[in-house]
Image (tube, rainbow, N blue to C red):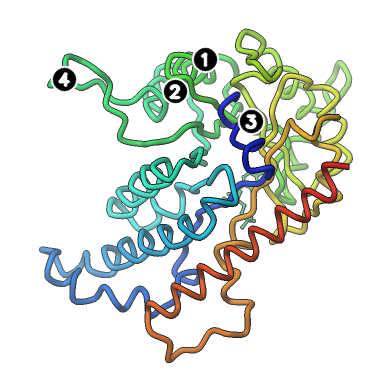
Amino acid sequence: MDRLIEAIENAQNPSVVGLDPTPALVPPQVVASFADEVRDSVEDPAEIPAAQLAVAYFEFNRTIIDAVADIVPAVKPQIAMYEAIGPAGVDVYTMTCEYAQQQGLYVLGDIKRGDIGSTAAAYAGHLSGVANADSGNEPFDPWHEDAVTVNPYLGTDGITPFTDAAAAADKDIFVLVRTSNPSSKELQELDLADGGKLYERVADLVEGWGSGSIGRHGYSRVGAVVGATHPEEGAALRERMPHTFFLVPGYGAQGGTAAGVAGMFDADGSGAIVNSSRGIIGAWKKTGEYRDDMSANEALALAASAARKAAQDMRDDLRVNVYR
Ligand SMILES: O=c1ccn([C@@H]2O[C@H](COP(=O)(O)O)[C@@H](O)[C@H]2O)c(=O)[nH]1
């Protein structure tokens, strides 16, 4: 977690931009502009729509990354948005992660994996890379992620492969503890027979899973996902999990605020990074400046300037509320 914490300190900005493209969030003329290129490069016509969307996603992501790279320390691509369009989308996910790392950003892959130990070990390839016999078994890293999100529902044997891979590769994981969505209460707020709530028990496990990997700044490699939509619980978790860094989604589009997340930071203004996805990459839709007759380049320029402004506003909002 040290690399992330130092990147946040350098940027003086504890926020991460979520790269969650959807057909509705990418200006239509950008998608249309790749029609000829894709038609010439794809063998099966049935692949054209997905391939066209995939190329447009990459061009859009590159534009957003270029617009915010000097403002934010990190990006969080959500793999579901890429998997939704098939293999071409997964390629664009990895290309996006690689491009973001090349621009000096910490890449937090939101992949939310979790399974029995043997299968979790395969998923942990996101961190450890893929064995490559052609290069003397030097692992090849096709994913370009600095951290991934993990689902703890299967317990310790589903987590250990990720913590082992993270330690070996000097990377991090973020485990779901208190998620931002409305239905999270159905399971996470369940009362335990011996007192407390289920999410509090998960919190204790997460703090324990990280106890052997505490870094220079007092936080372990095992972070927690804590939704911005739970301000009081998030503040209590901050006390309960002193060595666990928080990834805080739910700011903006889901209603979370900077004042609400302030209690999830420690006394030094560290300990958490706040995510916004739609609020940044979809900011162009709220400018009132978009026109259907814009060229693809004009639409991308608008998306870039709107995302930059939204990222600056979020940074300033967090600075005022967190660095009190
Ligand atoms: O509890 C959680 C865990 C993950 N997420 C993810 O974060 C982003 C939020 O997107 P917004 O557009 O800023 O709402 C998205 O990728 C979610 O899958 C979360 O929201 N809550």
The answer for how far apart the CA atoms under marks 3 and 2 are is 27 Å
**Residue 92's spot in the image, x, y percent?**
33, 52
Instruction: Judge by depth and name the residue closer to the eye, 311 or 195.
Output: 311
- At x 77%, y 59%, the residue is 255
Pointers 3 and 2 in contact (C-beta within 8 Å): no
Q: Nearer the viewer, mark 2 or mark 4?
A: 4
First in sequence: mark 3 or mark 4?
3
Instruction: Judge by depth and name the residue closer to the eye, 183 or 39.
Output: 39
What is the number of the mark on residue 5?
A: 3
Residue that mark 2 sits on: 120
User: Where 248 sits versus 215, above or below?
Assistant: below
Pointers 2 and 4 in contact (C-beta within 8 Å): no
What is the number of the mark on residue 135?
A: 4
**Residue 193's spot in the image, x, y percent?**
85, 19
Residue that mark 1 sits on: 160
Q: Nearer the viewer, mark 3 or mark 4?
A: 3
